[in-house]
Image: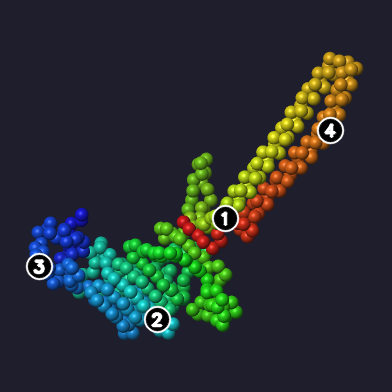
Amino acid sequence: MAKVRLNKEGCVVAGTVDDLIKDGVNLNKIPSNSGLMHTDAPCPPPNYKAAPNEKVIQNGGSFIVLGTDRPNTKASGKGAGGSSRASSIDLVVGRMASARKGEGPKEGEHVDNSFTADAARIYITGLGDLDDKFGLASGVRGQNTKNRSGIALKADGVRIIGRESVKIVTYGAQGVKGYGSTGETNSLGGTLSVAPTIEFIAGNSSDPVKAILADGNEDPEVETLQPVIMGDNLNMALTELTEVVLSLTDDVREFQKRQVRINRYIATGMTSLVKGGTSGKASASTNIGFITANNTVLQTRTSLPLWGTSNKGNLFKVNFLHPGGAYYICSESVFTT
């Protein structure tokens, strides 16, 4: 169990009741400003530099700020430019918590918003640049929530829990009319793209990387953010690929059987020709006729099926492995690292 840790002002920044007891603190009576049992914290929270148009609801280190888009100082965000569409609701706890290596702000310090140093936040804005202001990777298509409404959640850990289901959906509502030629629009009245992407970016980087191949050569850049696999399509692809391989196996086996018979008769005919004189020539002629017939069978029983198998392979690539194929195995809208 971690020991109690105090910052430079003597305020507790880490520890538990057990830690306090082990450190010799008398807890027979709970001090009113100890922070224990939900009493007031011994050190006051920092002072927030509220903008003139902001209504601040504060209780200790918990804030609800009703105002306009403001990522940092009063000069930042769409609210600084006077936008009438940039109304915002900012729910914040632990302002500047990670400042000074986790000790937090100095007692009595006045602070602005910080999308990087504040402990946890739910941020809602009618107009903002969320990807830029939260420092997010551009993603596979470079999509960026710029000059758009947005909601951001940020903390050390974020959990989305649905007892029965969770849906992550892009695009507008179904069956909506009256807001545009295709129904629902974005918050500015703009047309929505058909299938906006969903991207899972672990490590907040979507930059391609270099890879070293087994032969020691450097591979061209490999995308770190790649399409997720469509399970049903992949199942169909593997089933069809298995059928192509089995068909090819049957074709090769038939070819082998016919070729062995041809080789046997070639050997027999050559032996008869060497040993039998005139009768040997007649026997060789008979074998040549047999070989010719078998070559015809070889053409119909192996060459044509092999051609068909080759066509199946080409169709497999078009249907399953090419973007735009009927059963392309990669999602064209969902990507992950």
Which corner quadrant of the image does residue 91 belong to? bottom left
Query: Is 42 drawn above or below residue 284 in the view shown?
Result: below
Q: Residue 293 carries which label?
A: 4
| Mark 3 lies on residue | 29
Pointer 4 with pointer 3, Cβ within 8 A: no
Kindly identify the amino acid type of the residue bearing the numbered disc 4: Ala
Which numbered mark, 4 or 2, is in the foreground of this view?
4
Kindly identify the amino acid type of the residue bearing the numbered disc 2: Ser
Question: Residue 248: x and y, percent?
Answer: 68, 41
For the residues labelled 4 and 1, the Cα–Cα distance comes to 46 Å
Which corner quadrant of the image does residue 44 belong to? bottom left
| Mark 2 lies on residue | 87
Which numbered mark, 1 or 2, is in the foreground of this view?
1
Which corner quadrant of the image does residue 108 belong to? bottom left
Picture residue at 49% right of the left edge, 68% below the top: 169
Neighbourhood count class around disc 1 (C-alpha, 10 Å): few under 14, some 14–19, many 20 upward: few
Q: Give the structural element (helix, strand or loop) at label 1.
A: helix
Pointer 3 with pointer 1, Cβ within 8 A: no
Neighbourhood count class around disc 4 (C-alpha, 10 Å): few under 14, some 14–19, many 20 upward: few
Query: Considering only order in the chain, which callout, 2 or 1, is on the residue closer to the N terminus?
Result: 2
For the residues labelled 3 and 2, the Cα–Cα distance comes to 46 Å
Side (left or right) of 197 relative to 163? right
For the residues labelled 3 and 1, the Cα–Cα distance comes to 64 Å
Question: Residue 292: x and y, percent?
Answer: 84, 32
| Mark 1 lies on residue | 232
